[in-house]
Amino acid sequence: MSNENKFDKKLNIRITRPTTLAGVFGNLFGTFHRPASVSDLTERWDEIMGPDIASIAKLVAIKKTIDNKYSVVIKPANTALALQLSYANDEILRRINKYFGYPAISKITYKK
């Protein structure tokens, strides 16, 4: 392997590293199967949702509710997909709550 390829590989590794503190600690806690925080959900959205949902929906907000749970706001890639996502509501809740290890999310809303 040439020196140039080693340099490119190291550069690509640096570029793909997490850029937020939540992302850094999320990687550490992920080793122990513990998410760092709710903000970690934003960093790992694609991983948690999988390609089927992540390709058509993005997480845009997380809000704490009165009962100390969270409400998430999801924006579909286009408005026609909002109905399709609403049918997957239970699956989205299941994936998020599985990631946290407890029922952390109480409500999902869709932004058009």
Image (spheres, helix red, strand yellow):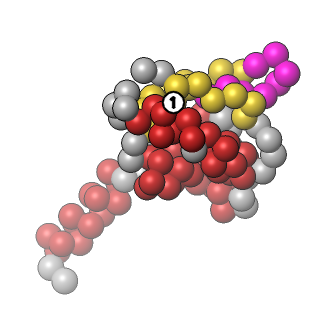
Q: Amino acid at mark 1?
A: Ile
Residue 32 on image: x %, y %: 72, 61
| The one of 67 and 10 positioned closer to us in this rendering | 67
Q: Quadrant of the N terminus?
A: bottom left
The residue shown at (66%, 35%) is 38
Image check: 103 left or right of 51? right
Image check: 109 left or right of 7? right
| The one of 84 and 60 positioned closer to us in this rendering | 84
Magenta: main secondary structure equals loop
- Report if residue 82 is visible in the image: yes
Residue 23 on image: x %, y %: 54, 44
Question: Toward which corner of the image does residue 67 lie, by quadrant?
Answer: top right
Q: Is residue 84 magenta?
A: no
- Report if residue 96 is visible in the image: no
Count neighbours of disc 1 (C-alpha within 10 A) and say few if under 14, some if 14 to 19, many if 20 or more. some
The residue shown at (56%, 51%) is 48
Residue 33 on image: x %, y %: 71, 59
Looking at this view, name the residue that lies furthest to the top.
66
In this rendering, is residue 77 above or below 61? below
Question: Which secondary structure, mark 1?
Answer: strand
Task: Name the residue tied to disc 1.
Answer: 74
The residue shown at (48%, 21%) is 111
Q: Quadrant of the C terminus?
A: top left
Magenta region, residue range: 65-72
In this rendering, is residue 105 above or below 64? below
Q: Is residue 66 magenta?
A: yes
The total of numbered circles placed on residues is 1
Image check: 93 left or right of 53? right
Residue 53 on image: x %, y %: 47, 48
